[in-house]
Image (cartoon, helix red, strand yellow):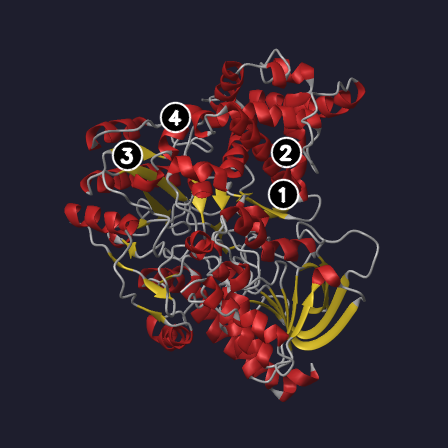
Amino acid sequence: MNESSIKDPIKIALADQRRDWRVTDGTQLSNEINIECDVVIVGSGAGGGTAAEILTQAGLKVVMIEEGPFKSSSDFRMRERDAYPQLYQESAGRQTKDKGITILQGRAVGGSTTINWTSSFRTPPATLKHWRDVWGLADYTEEGLAPWFAKMESRLSIAPWPVAPNENNDILRRGCAKLGIHAAAIRRNVKGCWNLGYCGMGCPTNAKQSMLVTTIPGALDRGMTLIHSARVEKLTSRNGRITSLVARGMAADGVGVNTEAGPHRIFVTARHFVLAGGAINNPGLMLRSRLVDPYNTLGKRTFLHPSPVSAAIMDEKVEAFTGAPQSIYSDHFLDTMPHDGPVGFKLEAPPIHPILAGITLQGFGEAHAMWMKRLPNMHVAIALLRDGFHPQSTGGQVAIRNDGSPVLDYRISDYLWAGMRHSLLVMAEVQFAAGAKIVMPMHEDAKPYRNWLDAKRALEVMTMQTLRTRVASAHVMGGCTMGVDPRTSVTGSDGRHHQLENLWVFDGSVFPTSIGANPQLSIYAMVARNATRLAELAKSPASMVA
Amino acid sequence: MAVSRRTFLKIGVASACVLVAARVLDREVFVLGEARGSLDLRALSNKDAACIAALAGAVLKSILPDDAAARLVAINEVVEAFDRTVAGLSPAVQTEMEELLSLLTFSVTRRFVAGVAKPWDQASEQDVSNFLDGWRQSRFALLQQGYQALVRVIMACWYGNPLSWGKIGYTGPPFGKELGLL
């Protein structure tokens, strides 16, 4: 088989007049658009996509607006230099305000689900318990959510993956086994996966059951209007309700909005407004719109699972650029670390492609080149820190720049730095246990270490500091905290804004802490429940009058 | 390294002044840098391009092709990709990058902030490496940020280029090979 035998279901549907998809490209507007609908959804990722399916199934008239482009499998060429500018926020170079953390986040139809690595975990019970105990979210129980998890797992083909892990993941498994640390296989949202290893550049075979190939086509078949390549600039509120939103088409290069003269604006009035643009963009839009925020909670408590990185050189070929990118994890350092103690972390492995490796490895010149020349033998581990559970981990704060764009100010506390050091030590030990010849923690002061003792000695005294320690994030959460107390949260447990009765936040930005696991399945299940409640409300006669 | 709040504020204000001065003065005492032939640039000036070319040589070293002519082609492709990358940055980050490049290409700040005496196209690889190391190890966040931004973008520009893949043993995307697209 080769790529010419793969059908692109999106391009086929768009060309099929009988399906009558209503899709507008914001870079190609010839008139100003005015639309009225029941529900408008801002964002098309895990939250927006799930909500779109449920709301259209209920017979509601839905409009979805997405800032990124509408790309699909025939556009996914597995080349980093094409994929990152096209499919990621800020060309995959989004960073926190002090540039200390690089954030991988999607910006395309399907949001981050179009480019994520397919890891699927139910919300850890300990996280839900913390939410009930501290945030008063009484209805976030394992039993209560179980049917919603089951529904979305079935919808997105989330299941154990029967194929052996690639070598990069197997090294993590073997290292953990040697040390007696529990590791297990990750469930994935794939159907007929080819095990290519290019999930992060958009799935070229449509095996990944992202929003792009599941719920969004379903919603379009039921009459949803999709406006892509358009940025929502402002929400207007009056008397405790949102009345309308205005969006602007993007310029042809997709970088910013179109500022040339012409009809670039889109006005939407709706009975309900759903925000699903992610934990940086949602607070950004709400701040830009100067929405009511009586207790100054908006944009606060934004979490990232900040992740230090550790590289290793193995004797045998690893070729971490091939095979399913994430298939093994260890929760040992979450399960054995209570929330009120030192920060816990989840161990995983990332894919290693040339650009990702090139920009993450420290140093330059020969020292850097030497590592790149050993790319096929390179293994990399990451540790996702569970931020937001301890008083000394309060997350970041979203603010808006002068031009209205959002920026996340996330200072890494000493509490988190201690966790970074701990996790770098653990990763080095695991890597040596798995047979690594050399381990190099990703830190400006680190050197290649040839044995565990040398690595341990160095890491124990290494200065843990912003910009010196490499920290990455692929998960944005929080910023629109849900809770029962309006003085400490932005929305209720159903995602409804405390002060604006027809504004709903349906994505990971309502999480009051990080998840402690890759968040997509948490978003799917919680949004499925909350969107079902909204659908019932929006269809009730009383709501029609309002 | 402990820097008191007072010192930090002074540095912050001083850096801001230097950046503004570099951008304003640069237009007044603009000396046209060595034009990089026929490069088609959108965001970078010719002076910026000469700077990036010099940086690329020191950042990438032996990972660039060994043959001199091939090396020149590679560096030009890095410069062009750098230009595309800058054009694709969000406006706020693009402004930061423009300020950084102004600082590096204005002769006064190049000499006193970057510590590079000669214009970029005459600086030796060692001069350039010394500059990079100085900023990398600087105790000022602004300079560390500048170092990391430059190196990251150069790395991304080269390792995104199929010309780089042979030396690092990356076999490339599977379909491309089958269909001869690379």
Q: Report, in whole angstroms, how far the alpha carbon at label 1 lies from the one at label 4.
A: 28 Å
Against B169, residue A305 (above or below) is below
Between residue A16 and residue A285, name the one nearer to us. Answer: A16
Residue A439's tag is 3
Residue type marked 3:
Val
N-term mark: 1 or 2: 1
What secondary structure is marked by label 3?
A: strand
A396 to the left or right of A59: left
Residue at the location (48% across, 57% down)?
A: A115
> Please, which chain is the residue tagged with disc 2 on?
B
Are there few (<14), some (14-19), or many (20+) residues within 10 Å of tag 3? Answer: many
Q: Report, in whole angstroms, how far the alpha carbon at label 1 lies from the one at label 3.
A: 33 Å
Residue type marked 4:
Ala
Residue type marked 2:
Met
Residue A367's tag is 4
Q: Report, in whole angstroms, how far the alpha carbon at label 1 lies from the one at label 2.
A: 9 Å
Against A353, residue B96 (above or below) is above
> Please, which chain is the residue tagged with disc 1 on?
B
Number of callouts? 4
Task: List the residue tagged with mark 2.
Answer: B97
Task: Estimate the x, y position of residue A270 in percent, counting from the top left.
Answer: 69, 74
In the displayed orientation, state which residue is furthest to the bottom: A541
